[in-house]
Image: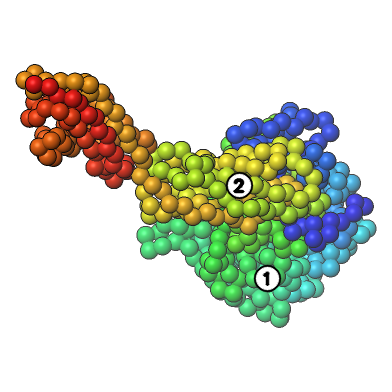
Amino acid sequence: MSPAWSAGDQQSLWGTQLRRNQHRIRIAATLAALTLGTAGLTALAPSAALAADGPVAGDTVAKLPISSYSAMVVDSAHERVYITDDRRDRVANQVHVYNFQGQKVGSLPTGTAPSGMALSADGGTLYVSQSSGILVFDTVTQQRTGFTFTAYDVGCPRDVAFAGGKEWHTETPYYSDCDTRTTWLYGTSGTQPTNTGWNGAGRLRLTSGPEVPDRIVMAQTRSPGEADPFLTTLDASGDTLVRGPERRFADAEGRGALDVRDTAQSPDGRRIAVADAAYGTRLLDAADLSDAPAGYQPLPEGAVASAVAFSGDGTHIARGAAATGSTADLLVQAADPAAGTAPLEFAYEGALDGDRIAPRGLGWSKDGSRLFAVTTNTYGNEYWLHVIQPPAAQYDSRFTGALSTTPGRPVVGEPVGIRGRLELDGPAPAEPVRVSAVRHDANGDRKLAPVEVDADGSFTVLDVPSLVGEATYTVSFTGDVTHRPAEDATLAVTVDKAPTTIALTAPAEATKSAGLTITGTLTGQGRPLPAGITLSVVRTDRKGTGTLTSAAVAADGTFTINDLPRATGSVTYEVGYAGDALHSGSTASATVRVRV
């Protein structure tokens, strides 16, 4: 038996490093991705801090001998994983049994194709549904110990649940069109079925678990006969099922209807997560099925929700999806959305791993030390079991010292570096970690490009401020395989206008009769200077000071000043630019000796 991970170890979000002995790990610089050689599994994350000698997350893969799939049950008490084959057009006649290392250790004969499974609260009994009844197995001896008759012997699959110390199952009394017919919910009395009276069009999906022993979550599947399916809970603590809150999700125009693929209850019973193919991952308050105060970030673009599961210790949630190519099919993250930590993302895209997470294809060990994931190919006729283990520990991180800017006083339209230092406890990372930053100013928030942290912990985030005035930079480190997130660091700055410069070229001497010409160039930093600029020209001689005709600035910044001096002697010309919204003003002067 493998040692269990401690509760403290489970507080970490899993990192980006995976290892199999036969595969070489490579780092993709822009995606911080680790690709597992020929197996085709890619783990993606926003940062890539990988401990050279530190803990890793392992992924063991077993090819399943099935061509269809309907259910998986994880028995933590005996370290067994049960998987059914739900091929309706042939006799599959067994439930496959695997240990926690991904090795097949046996099978349970079922006579006809099994479709649903449920484990008793103490883990001692496994209930398996097939066409004519519910089979009962002892999980220690792996022997069949009983059989519960069902109301009908049919070809439509059944869901099974165990709640309130009793077994419950669905009945669709037909041989075809199983997804559109009316489905009924039954209990049992001894070895005989008892109709609860609850029913709905299409299939009814049941979810139960020992963490919430008296509650069943029942979800109606989407079908031509039900455009706005329901989700409800049932209290099984008494002799009669008592319905709790019920919710439908479509708005007045029919948009947003539920398309359920899987549901899961948090171990404390307060939350229900729903894998909704039309929405993503919904997180609901179990008390009334309203949306939880904070939800999970959307699944990656193009990913369709297919499975969801809370870890047994309640610290993590796994969200499965069907996606193509390198788009993530599995996200593992903190169960509390308010934690704000980035998820670990897995992309399955190879012939040896499958292409996506199968519907209802996720389950955890009770202590959270292992996540079991069933993947399938694009055609849904091949399946794999993944046994994923987290790293053993995680360490603290922090920003040290104050943030600073280079240059010290930022100007609008010019690059500025926000400099700081990140300190990491534990093993030194083999690859640089990344920090991200957000600039907040009068125009709102703008995310800046993440940057790598140097080996000594220093970093410089680059920005080009676009607005004059006050701005605040917030720098973040969301954690990685070996480190917890750091508390954000902030820096308030004042962004100045960009400076301008006037350069003049004037003759040393001139005559009153011939006049003089002064040329010059106006240049500015930051954003381009606006078109149509005119410069003020002031002349000072022995007769006093006067303003001349302004000088027009050409598109290339050049200008020309022509003048007929009114007096001899030293004449000074001062040229000025008043500035604009993004540029400060500037002046320049030239002195010419004027003769008769």
The answer to whether residue 193 shows anywhere in this view is no
Name the quarter where the C terminus is drawn: top left
The answer to whether residue 585 shows anywhere in this view is yes
Q: Which of the 4 image quadrants contains residue 470?
A: bottom left
| Closest to the observer, 302 or 149 | 302
Question: Residue most toward the top?
Answer: 514
Q: Is residue 439 left or right of residue 560?
A: right
Q: Which residue is mark 2?
A: 420
Q: Secondary structure at mark 2?
A: strand
Q: Is residue 328 above or below residue 123?
A: above
10 Å neighbourhood of mark 1: few (<14), some, or many (≥20)? Answer: some
User: Earlier along the polypeptide chain: callout 1 or callout 2?
Assistant: 1
Q: Amino acid at mark 2?
A: Gly
Residue at position x 7%, y 30% from top? 566
Q: Is residue 410 left or right of residue 289?
A: left
| Closest to the observer, 251 or 451 | 451
Q: Which residue is mark 1?
A: 269
Q: Horizontal and vertical percent for residue 324?
A: 58, 37
10 Å neighbourhood of mark 2: few (<14), some, or many (≥20)? Answer: many
| Closest to the observer, 415 or 351 | 415
Residue at position x 65%, y 42% from top? 458
Total label count? 2
Q: Horizontal and vertical percent for residue 400?
A: 66, 52
Q: Is residue 255 left or right of residue 323?
A: left
Q: CA distance from mark 1 to mark 2?
A: 43 Å
Residue at position x 70%, y 49% from top? 423
